[in-house]
Image (cartoon, grey):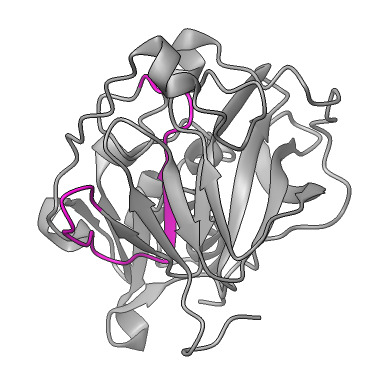
Amino acid sequence: MNNASDPVTVVVSVDGPYLVTGPVTVEYQVIAQDDTGASWTWKRADPVTTGSRFKLCRCGHSGNKPFCDNSHLREGFDGTETASRATHGEQAAVTDGPTMSLADVRSLCAMARFCDGHGDAWSAVESSSTDEARGTAAHEASHCPAGRLVAYDKSAGGAAVEPDLEPSIGIIEDPAVGVSGGLWLRGGIQVTSEDGTPYPVRNRAVLCRCGASRNKPFCDGAHRRTRFADDRLPAYDATADGTDTVPTPSV
């Protein structure tokens, strides 16, 4: 567990890797499907051993994924950052419902497909006068790894409906689609730009690790388009195993 004296930080280096500092759990996280084939839970897979300082690949070419092996130098990787420095709230389009609202920053979509597992989060918010719809909205929004979607509970004074996540880094695997996803920052990890400017801290964020995002350093789902895959990994099973590494908030 992290504490205030041991913060975890990620610094984006110029055309190079992510520089991670601090004691943090790193492990593969698998998008798991329910019996209807919908993305519905997250399951923990292989842990990754690190020290208190390490470098994670962001060009997509390392032969030692998820770590950097300086392949960005050979590949001439252009890691120019293009993401907004504005807060989530400043960027978001808002869907309003009777008891909930939903803030959506489309540019942050990591293509994990939790938002439309059973119905969709937007419709659930619009129908949030019922307990079933409120539960669906809370589950689908809170399981979005990138925090593209943030639900708010009007009956709780407009509080954000956020899962309780310890600071950790999940390396996303999507076996149902056959691709590897981005680096999932959980629990409010600070990301700092190559020019020293901190990005707004969020409970959920996904960094690009395929090198092809148009919203660097954040994932925009480009791994789906490029069919990015970590070929060193075993064939993870996409079937839900009854566990979930993201606790659905109560609403």
The quarter holding residue 45 reads top right
Q: Is residue 230 left or right of residue 227?
A: right
Observer-nearest of 14 and 45 = 14
Residue 157 position within the rendered picture, expressed as x and y whole percent measured from the top left: 28, 87
Count of marks placed on residues: 0
Residue 63 position within the rendered picture, expressed as x and y whole percent measured from the top left: 65, 21
Q: Is residue 123 left or right of residue 227?
A: left
Residue 69 position within the rendered picture, expressed as x and y whole percent measured from the top left: 57, 29
Observer-nearest of 151 and 128 = 151
Residue at position x 68%, y 16% from top?
178
Q: Is residue 108 above or below residue 59?
A: below
Q: Is residue 121 above or below residue 175?
A: below
Residue at position x 33%, y 25% from top?
213
Residue at position x 43%, y 69% from top?
188
Please report the bounds of the magenta region as a residue range: 193-212
Q: Is residue 194 above or below residue 174?
A: below
Q: Is residue 87 magenta?
A: no
Q: Is residue 99 left or right of residue 247?
A: left
Mark yes or no: residue 127 visible. no
Residue at position x 66%, y 61% from top?
51
Mark yes or no: residue 207 visible. yes
Q: Is residue 202 magenta?
A: yes
Residue 103 position within the rendered picture, expressed as x and y whole percent measured from the top left: 26, 56
Observer-nearest of 25 and 71 = 71
Q: Is residue 59 above or below residue 133?
A: above
Q: Is residue 183 left or right of residue 245?
A: left
The quarter holding residue 218 reads top left
Predominant SS along the magenta part: loop
